[in-house]
Image (cartoon, grey):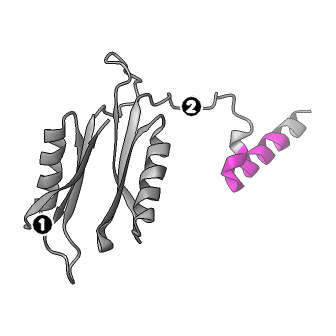
Amino acid sequence: MRLKSAIAAIGMLLVSVAHPWAADLFTTEQPPAPPPDERGIWAAIAYSAPDEKYGFFWGADKRQEAMDIALKHCERDKGKSCVVVSVFRNHRHWDDDDKTGFPYNHCGALATGKEGGKRVTPWGANSAPTRREAEDLALKACEGSGSRCSIREWVCT
């Protein structure tokens, strides 16, 4: 009987070495808890740098929804390389803390430079608790290239 148990144990060891996933079949650990719901009113900015097209969306219940719709607006504006460049959210209630670590920033801004032409136009996007702070951060990011920049669009949720 001991020999059979030893052979079975060696077989399980060999299977778990050959196929690391096989070891998971014999564990008693609980699967990780799902992430908490991300509360808030979500917004996103999408931008296509080569053709300077952009899309905004605000008022979504979920982060992914805001991102998807911002991308869709950018692509509808004929953006050929649209990517989400900023995602932010507002409180539904001032004491709302969903423990995800994702900050509550009420406003977002997109700044673009004056270059154009053969070079890709410098740009910057950011979010912050206020419109002024979001605009300042977007301008700072854009002007890091040495170009003069201006706010192209802003939104607050």
Which contiguous range is marked in magenta? 7-22
Give coordinates of residue 98: x percent, y percent: 41, 24
Residue 9 painted magenta = yes
Helix, strand or loop under label 1: loop
Viewer-closest of 21 and 34: 34
Whether residue 49 is situated above or below residue 91 in the rendered picture: below
Q: Label 2 belongs to which residue?
A: 34
Residue 15 painted magenta = yes
Q: Label 1 belongs to which residue?
A: 145
Q: Quadrant of the C terminus?
A: top left
Residue at image coords 51%, 31%: 35
- Judged left or right of residue 41, residue 111 is left
| Residue 80 placement: quadrant | bottom left
Give coordinates of residue 148: x percent, y percent: 7, 64
- Badge 2 amino acid: Pro
- Badge 1 amino acid: Ser
